[in-house]
Amino acid sequence: NRREFIYSRRLADDYPSMIEISSPDHRSNPREYYERADFILSRVRHPHLVKVLEYGTFAHPNHKYGDYHARVQDRINGVGLLQVLNQCGRFDGKTALSVMIPVVDALKKAASIEAKFRPSRALIETRQKFGPDREEMFPSLNRICSDLFSVSQIWLCVLPDGRLIAKVDAHVPDNHTEISFSNVSEFADLGVKGDTEEAAVVATGRVLYKLITGRTFRLKGAKLELSKELSGFDSRLEELTISCIVGKPLNRPKTLGAVQKLMEEVWRYMHF
């Protein structure tokens, strides 16, 4: 899918990493999609966020569609959460919270980073070539945490000491414009503006809903009542997820911090 991954190690200290190379095609130049996101993500440090170590572009003399984009990131020693869900169906409340509480904390940290993006000379030339309207296509960090956030970006990773933790790989999908358009259209039906923290709350609710129920939340034709097969804390979490998405039966939290606080309250009650 125009992306190639190469295992690597940093020469200075043998640090395990992974190189992702995105090739251009007739539809897009990858620099347009990734340079802004990687600039910001390389400045975010959180144990549950996959770090971007280096990034840049390089030319291929025989490729007529433009430059390749390369990003060097932490090597993910684990499995995608979506793959795990496909095997087990759904998570119980305790497992879902052990994944989502640190993930939301990572997104909250990412959303709080105020980094002034400075386009490279090559990107400036690209803008001049395609016109200033192309700048609107560059994903902001808010959009990565809101319009584009999904289960497919979460990994269960094994640390060197054997611990299992969840990490967010805040990559920019190749079809991010289609994903963003679809999500923003649904956000509008909910009275939420895309590319905002409130949109991130909705996206977080959708991910947690997927973990708890094993189903993807669809606004059109959705039955806004709790599942009969869930009970106890699982039912309480489902109520929280639906509230994050549609603002019923509880008021929708306005920030990721408020969502994290509500999840932590449920976690504490679980351990009484």
Image (spheres, grey):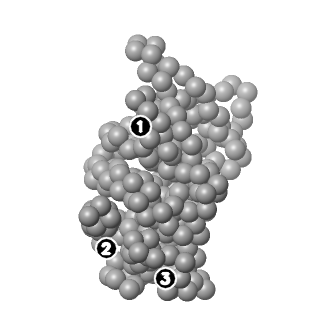
Residue 66 visible here: no
In the rendered image, which quarter is residue 31 located in? Answer: top right
Foreground residue among 270 and 14: 270
Residue 102, horizontal then vertical, whole percent: 35, 51
Q: Secondary structure at mark 3?
A: loop
Q: Is residue 1 left or right of residue 43?
A: right
Pointer 3 or 1: first along the chain: 1
Residue occupying image coordinates x 34% and y 77%: 252
Q: Secondary structure at mark 2?
A: loop
- Amino acid type, callout 1: Arg
Q: Quadrant of the C terminus?
A: bottom left
Q: Quadrant of the N terminus?
A: top right
Pointer 2 or 3: first along the chain: 3
Residue sitting farthest toward the top: 12
Pointer 3 residue: 226
Q: Is residue 178 placed above or below 174 in the rendered structure?
A: below
Pointer 1 residue: 163
Q: Is residue 114 placed above or below 125 in the rendered structure?
A: below
Residue occupying image coordinates x 39% and y 54%: 98
Residue 62 visible here: yes
Residue occupying image coordinates x 57% and y 47%: 80
Foreground residue among 164 and 243: 164
Pointer 2 or 1: first along the chain: 1
Distance from label 2 to label 3 (Cα)? 19 Å
Q: How many marks?
A: 3
Pointer 2 residue: 253
Distance from label 3 to label 1 (Cα)? 34 Å
Dots 2 and 1: beta carbons under 8 Å? no
